[in-house]
């Protein structure tokens, strides 16, 4: 491994632009480096290690920028920014039926590369242009009662850590790391045989009818999403399942859900003009999973950047009462300018996951809010968080939250293992602002 401690300076490696996330609510000044090899990542890390003022120096990896807060970003005056968009390889190992992906590979890269082998990943993010490494490290999730967060796809994680060396991590408790273990340069993922799905979209479901039925509906489908408009008292529902046939020939489905009716016309969405959300899709044999599982279309480009997000998790059985409480908030249109998306996710054992079994539920209801990026956004986040306090709702730390993330991770065996790993792999703390409690 090249031990040169000087920063690389080729035109392909350095960018002079100041980096900002997708929503443009977080900006990091400084040079963005685009390494094309793992050796270059090592050189960049070792250069920071060699700096004299380590208290002022740190490293932060930027991906597709679809986080809205960055808990592990070092609060330093000199921040080295790494973008791994050139380390985006995807290779498939037929002997293990796993694939290895570079730290800059997106879900779109992965599903396309696996398709010729008749393989895919069993779950995806809502948007396929996000990096797999970023989604796994932040406990990004899809939806479904059997689906854990996306870290569950991971078998092995390769990082360049704060000690300047490459480490292969197989302890799954460390896969959700919030950027504190180093630069993830590669991941080995489980794959499954390619599969196809049907999607049914129902419009005009009354919120009153949805309240009590929500837990059972969420539990009854492979994947589902519900867009709640509190001001109008209606719900738009997407149900995703394997194709069902009578005598292997005729597709069967229900034409109603509660008091809602099937919708076939695509749904316009503000963040992606021209890339309407797909509605009911019941083609014979179904459609490929990566066209159905993501909320946004496979080819969607989110061109509007004037919204922010907050997300909270509650026990699935509490969802009806939580929705009722949210519906009673004053000035509901101002607080929830784009409604609330409801999904579910299964608990896990990843140390830093907001769905960890330590929080007491087997399956969580995920309440996702898209908010206008205005002066009142923090008040809206605080209002929503306050309304959910009595259900001990936990926030997603890649999105806006009303309180600091660290106190939620009480000391147990998993967090002890995690903090020990950060201290061992990052002795100078160049990847972490947070320290063990």
Image: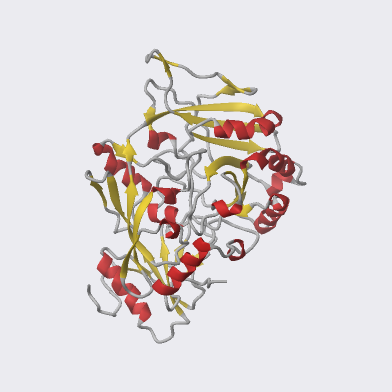
Is residue 333 placed above or below 203 in the rendered structure? below
Tally of numbered tags: 0
From the image, which quarter does the C terminus lie in? bottom right
Which residue ends up furthest to the bottom in the rendered image?
Answer: 52
- Quadrant of the rendered image containing residue 95: top left
Is 43 placed left or right of 23 in the picture? left
Name the foreground residue: 365 vs 323: 365
Q: How is the image coloured?
A: secondary structure
Residue 306 seen in this snapshot: no
**Residue at x 71%, y 38% (from the top left corner):** 231
Name the foreground residue: 304 vs 323: 323
Is residue 178 placed above or below 122 in the rendered structure? below
Residue 281 at x, y percent in the picture: 45, 26
**Residue at x 47%, y 43% (from the top left corner):** 126
From the image, which quarter does the N terminus lie in? bottom left
Residue 163 at x, y percent in the picture: 36, 75
Name the foreground residue: 70 vs 101: 101
Residue 185 at x, y percent in the picture: 32, 61
- Quadrant of the rendered image containing residue 19: bottom left
**Residue at x 73%, y 41% (from the top left corner):** 327
Residue 69 at x, y percent in the picture: 54, 61
Which residue ends up furthest to the front in the rendered image?
Answer: 413
Is residue 355 placed above or below 203 in the rendered structure? below
Is residue 297 placed above or below 62 in the rendered structure? above
Residue 335 seen in this snapshot: yes
């Amino acid at each position: 491994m090249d031990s040169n401690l000087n920063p690389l300076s080729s035109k392909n490696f350095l960018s002079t632009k100041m980096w900002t996330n997708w929503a443009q609510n977080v900006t990091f000044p400084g040079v963005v480096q685009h390494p094309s090899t793992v050796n270059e990542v090592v050189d960049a890390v070792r250069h920071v290690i060699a700096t004299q003022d380590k208290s002022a120096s740190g490293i932060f990896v930027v991906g597709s920028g679809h986080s809205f807060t960055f808990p592990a970003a070092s609060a330093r005056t000199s921040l080295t920014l790494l973008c791994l968009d050139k380390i985006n390889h995807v290779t498939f190992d037929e002997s293990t039926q796993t694939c290895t992906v570079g730290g800059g590979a997106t879900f779109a890269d992965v599903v396309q590369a696996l398709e010729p082998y008749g393989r895919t990943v069993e779950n995806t993010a809502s948007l396929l242009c996000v990096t797999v490494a970023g989604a796994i490290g932040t406990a990004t999730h899809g939806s479904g009662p059997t689906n854990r967060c996306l870290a569950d796809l991971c078998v092995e994680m390769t990082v360049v850590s704060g000690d300047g060396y490459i480490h292969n991590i197989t302890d799954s408790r460390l896969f959700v790391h919030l950027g504190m273990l180093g630069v993830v340069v590669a991941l080995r993922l489980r794959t499954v045989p390619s599969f196809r799905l049907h999607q049914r979209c129902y419009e005009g479901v009354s919120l009153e009818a949805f309240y009590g039925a929500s837990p059972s509906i969420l539990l009854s489908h492979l994947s589902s999403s519900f867009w709640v408009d509190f001001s109008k008292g209606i719900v738009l529902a997407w149900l995703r399942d394997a194709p069902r046939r009578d005598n292997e020939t005729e597709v069967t489905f229900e034409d109603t859900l509660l008091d809602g009716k099937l919708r076939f016309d695509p749904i316009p969405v503000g963040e992606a003009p021209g890339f309407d959300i797909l509605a009911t899709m019941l083609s014979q044999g179904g459609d490929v999973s990566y066209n159905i599982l993501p909320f946004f279309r496979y080819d969607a480009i989110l061109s509007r950047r004037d919204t922010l997000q907050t997300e909270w998790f509650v026990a699935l059985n509490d969802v009806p009462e939580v929705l009722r409480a949210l519906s009673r908030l004053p000035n509901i249109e101002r607080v929830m300018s784009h409604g609330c998306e409801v999904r579910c996710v299964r608990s896990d054992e990843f140390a830093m996951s907001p769905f960890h079994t330590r929080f007491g539920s087997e399956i969580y209801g995920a309440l996702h809010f898209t908010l206008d990026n205005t002066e009142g956004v923090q008040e809206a986040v605080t209002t929503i968080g306050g309304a959910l306090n009595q259900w001990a709702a936990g926030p997603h730390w890649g999105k806006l939250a009303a309180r600091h993330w660290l106190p939620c991770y009480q000391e147990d065996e998993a967090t002890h293992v995690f903090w020990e790993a950060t201290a061992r792999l990052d002795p100078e703390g160049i990847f972490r602002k947070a320290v063990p409690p």
